[in-house]
Image (cartoon, coloured by chain):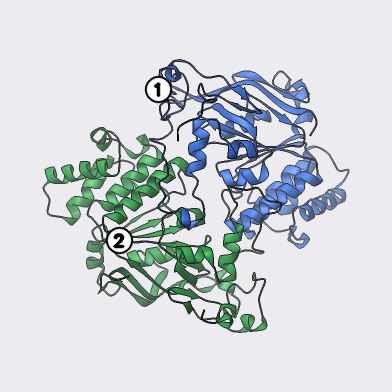
Chain colours: A green, B blue
Amino acid sequence: MEQKTLDVRSLTVCIQTMKGMIRPVNDVSLEVPRGGIVGIVGESGCGKSMTARAVMGLIRYPGKVTGGSVYLEGREITSLPEKERRKLRGAEISMIFQEPMTSLNPVMKVGKQVEEAVLLHTNCSKEEARAKTLDIFREVEIPEAEARYNCYPHQLSGGLRQRVMIAMAAVCRPKLLIADEPTTALDVTVEAQILKLLERLRDAGTGVLLISHSLGIIARVCDYVYVMYAGQIVEQAETEVIFDRPAHPYTRGLLRSVVSLREGAGTLETIPGVVPNLLRLPAGCSFSLRCGMCTERCEKDAPRLLETEPGHKVRCFLAEKEGVR
Amino acid sequence: MSGCLLEARELTKEFPAAGKKRIHAVSGVSLKIREGETLGLVGESGCGKSTLGKLMIGALKPDAGEVFFRGKNIIAMTEREFKPLRKELQLVFQDPYASLDPRMTVRDLVAEPIETWGLCANRKETTLRVQDLLRAVEIPEEFLCRYPHQFSGGQRQRIGIARAIAADPSFIVCDEPVSALDVSVQNQILNLLKALKASRKLTFLFISHDLSVVRYLADRVCVMFLGKVCEIGPTEEVYLHPRHPYTRFLLDAVPVPDPSQRGKEIRLLKGEPPSPADPPSGCRFCTRCPYAAARCAAEDPELRDLGGVQAACHFADKAFSV
């Protein structure tokens, strides 16, 4: 990792709820290299989307970023005034969401929506903006780009809507693209096309932070993976390493839970229990309640994220004991 | 695996759409479900999987075609004749958040089907039966008086399953029962369904867009595309030697959790499924199929027997150069 597009250090988000304070993102550090795809994987409620929103600067009241910093190509952005951050969004960092229908304006032609992003962030004339929009439509393989320019979101299929979203996110050539479950609402054959598109953006030099619950998607496109659980990163490593020698019991459980397409099985592996309520986290390791290898120490103390081999970090006492390989 | 429990013959269902168009949800589907088996039904969204599931249990009336349950045509029955059969045919829904009444306690939710069918003499007996059912789906008894919002998604799905099995049905349509759940919880539900199927001698129609899940549960699998059956056969055979080009692409597109496959060029299907309001002539897959010939656009292929597997493709017996 020579040049970092994104460098997040000890990011913490707190939300004051009626029942108490929760920390959906707890001391999260991560990096996205230039022209790389980095994945965050975890179950619902583990804080992966919150992390993305915090990077974008989209945490709303009662949520609050209470600590840490975010560097975009070496420039700290969390301390910037809101006006400056708004200039970054859409130009240097952009984001695509799971459900494209809810993120597009239903009463505005999709071409105009993409054009709007161009006009906001560059000094283009209207004609130039339109030309740029059509170019990016062709680049993300929207068929009959000119005809689609005048469509409203409801006239497009789910796959095309997601392509419009990607076009909108990519039109200003951002340094970083955050994709939050971009294919969850799509069919597998369309999903494969969208993933291909993300890889093409990566090849063009954009850093991609891909958030997904699917290990299949992570394995297919990511170079490096962060595994999140209850607001914390519990393991991080290169994709091959995570799949080859996962060290955290949670990662192991997740990998064992993947239902194989290639072979049938007797009984499926499961992780007992459910994701803990952030209001009632156990005193020690947050995974201790569901962990098959939980010891007394795990119930008392919280493990730290430690490096077990170069580029591979694990938050578990057992991995610590096994030592540096 | 004995006889045929349910049989669909030439089922067709269309829905009206804007501009006098009609959505061809299910077009001339015939299939048999054997007693005690799990038939997996896969396909992309909008291909008519859920509509077919509802038609099979008489929850929707088809425009044409018949459904036979234990040899009796349930479509031709009057409401009164059909009513006793209704408890034999149950449904588990996709969204455990939307399918439970938020103002009913777990006890009342699970008791509802028991009371509807008058299966228990009094309230006490009903509660005992509810407790049995909750035990079967592994919900702690002390939760009897809780409301749906107090449960996690997986637990809610268990309650939905308890409702479906409450009247001792013989056939259950599971319509995407795990797609709203996290992986770790998804497997708990799949294991539960498999165990219940064995202990209660159930027959399943298991609808899912997730091919891996279907592989785990189904004895046979049926692949649909735009309201028609492309391929149907024993799960192993279909997954290992898909005959229909669509099945091949579908299997290829599933992301495999194996990073060594990363960067490997996968063959992508061009475009997206055509609109069911305006299906192409001939073979419905022909506009996306890279092997399509002139014949495909002109002539709709019939399901043909190809050594245990049936596929609807003019060229299914030829080896595709892939």
Residue A180 in view here: yes
Give the x, y percent position of residue B37: 73, 37
Mark 2 belongs to chain: A
| The N terminus of chain A sits in image quarter | bottom left
Q: What residue type is labelled 2?
A: Gly
Residue A46 in view here: no
- Residue annotated with mark 1: B19
Locate residue B148 relative to residue B249 in the image: left or right: right
**Is B288 above or below relative to A254?**
above
Q: Which amino acid does label 1 sit on?
A: Gly
**Is A118 above or below relative to B208?**
below
Q: Residue at x 67, y 71 (%)?
A: A292
Locate residue A177 relative to residue B134 in the image: left or right: left
**Which label lies toward us, 1 or 2?**
2
**Distance Cα–Cα, label 1 vs label 2:** 47 Å
Q: Which residue is drawn at 43% across and 27% down?
A: B291
Mark 1 belongs to chain: B
Locate residue A280 relative to residue A113 in the image: left or right: right
Helix, strand or loop at disc 1? Answer: loop
**Label of residue A35 in the image:** 2
Q: Nearer the viewer, residue B235 or A11?
A: B235
Task: Specify few, some or many for label 2: CA neighbours under 10 Å numbering under 14, 14-19, or 20 or more.
Answer: many
